[in-house]
Each structure stands twice: as C-alpha cells, then as structure tokens.
Image: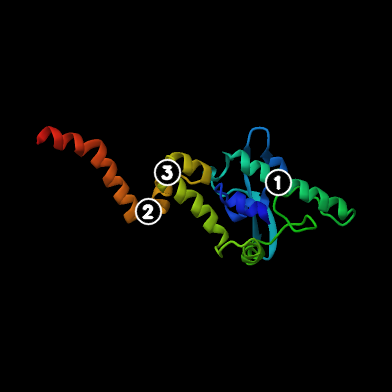
Amino acid sequence: MKPVVYLGLVGLRRSEMLALTWNDVDFANCTINVDKNLVVINGKMSIGRCKTRSSVRKITVPKSVMNKLAECRQSQQLEKMAQIGKYQDNGLVVCKLNGSYIIPASLSSMFPTMLKKYGLRKIRIHDLRHTYCTLGINYYNIPATVIAKQAGHSSPRVTMDSYSHANEELQRESSDIFEDRLFGDINQKLG
C-alpha cells in the first residue's frame, strides 16, 4: 500500500497505479512509464491503454521516491518467496499480498486504514494527485506545462484551471514581490 502514497504524490491516477508494473519503473533513470490503466467493466477488471494521448507519458520521479519504491519491491519479493505456488506474479507495483490485482473501489476503501496506521490524516487517494499539482504550481513555482505533462493533462490550461488557487497568502506574496521588484524603483523615481 505504501507505493500508493508515493505514486499519487508524483501525479498518478488511481487506475494508473493499479495497472503499473515493475517493468514500467526505470530505477536507473528515475522515470516511470505510464501507458495503461485498470478499469472495471461489468464487474470484471481489465487492463487497457490510457484513455487519452496525453495520459500516456513518461514521468521523472525524485530519487527518494525511487528508493522507496525499490524498498517496496524488495518487500514484495520476500512476500512472493513466502507464498511459493500461491503468489500470482503479475509484476504489479500496487497489488494484494498474493500479487493479484486490487479492485479500484477496494483500494479507496483500504486507503484510510493505511493512513491511520502511519499516523497520517484521512484523505482520498485522488487528494495525493491534487496535492502534487497544487503544490507544484502554487508553492514550488513549477511551470504549469511541466505539471500538466507529469499529471497527464491534455494542456497546461486544464492544469491551471483545476489547480491554481489564488489564496490570500499567495496574493500577499505576489503583492510583496511587485512592491520589491517594481514599485519600489518606480516610487523612488517618481517621487
């Protein structure tokens, strides 16, 4: 379950996490290839291509996240050895203890329990992705084009419309920047 937190915080959707395989994770280059998702149709799980071209992407991931994913993979390998003959090796990054697929709704219902176990406040899985986009744009000043690409949005406009929040704190910071960089000089020259 830990990979869910890390994958959400680098912009993956729940359905993308559940279809992600270790073959999609490039530890040497710190990238993840996102090209499929897990969907439930008429009660049956199915792996399919991402629904839009922009959803198919290769994302760059922080080294610390890759290290955590490597730890998760190692734990998964130990579980696999403990369940010889019973483990369903689908190569999944996010899976049940026996290696099988997790139903998307089940992951959502298990997620709060995992958060509680680690002393984290209750949020939805999608809130991880929302946090990634919001912090990237509003607090870390990452260009919307980069966030849009990482998140698989069709355009930076979609990203900006969904995740840029002009809160009072940001407005105050913006005002202070203009004061320091523009108006201080103009006021001095204009008297």
Q: Nearer the viewer, residue 110 or 15?
A: 110
Distance between mark 1 and mark 2 Cα atoms: 34 Å
Q: Nearer the viewer, mark 2 or mark 3?
A: 2
Residue 143, above or below 106:
above
Q: Are marks 1 and 2 in contact (CB under 8 Å)?
A: no
Residue 62 located left or right of residue 22: left
Q: Which mark is residue 21?
A: 1
Q: Are marks 2 and 3 in contact (CB under 8 Å)?
A: no
Say what amino acid the circle numbered 1 marks: Thr
Say what amino acid the circle numbered 3 marks: Pro
Q: Quadrant of the N terminus?
A: bottom right
Q: Nearer the viewer, residue 138 or 149?
A: 138
Q: Which mark is residue 165?
A: 2
Residue 140 located left or right of residue 61: left
Q: Which residue is mark 3?
A: 156
Tell me the quarter of the picture where residue 26 sits. top right
Say what amino acid the circle numbered 2 marks: His
Mark 1 or mark 2: whose residue is earlier in sequence = 1
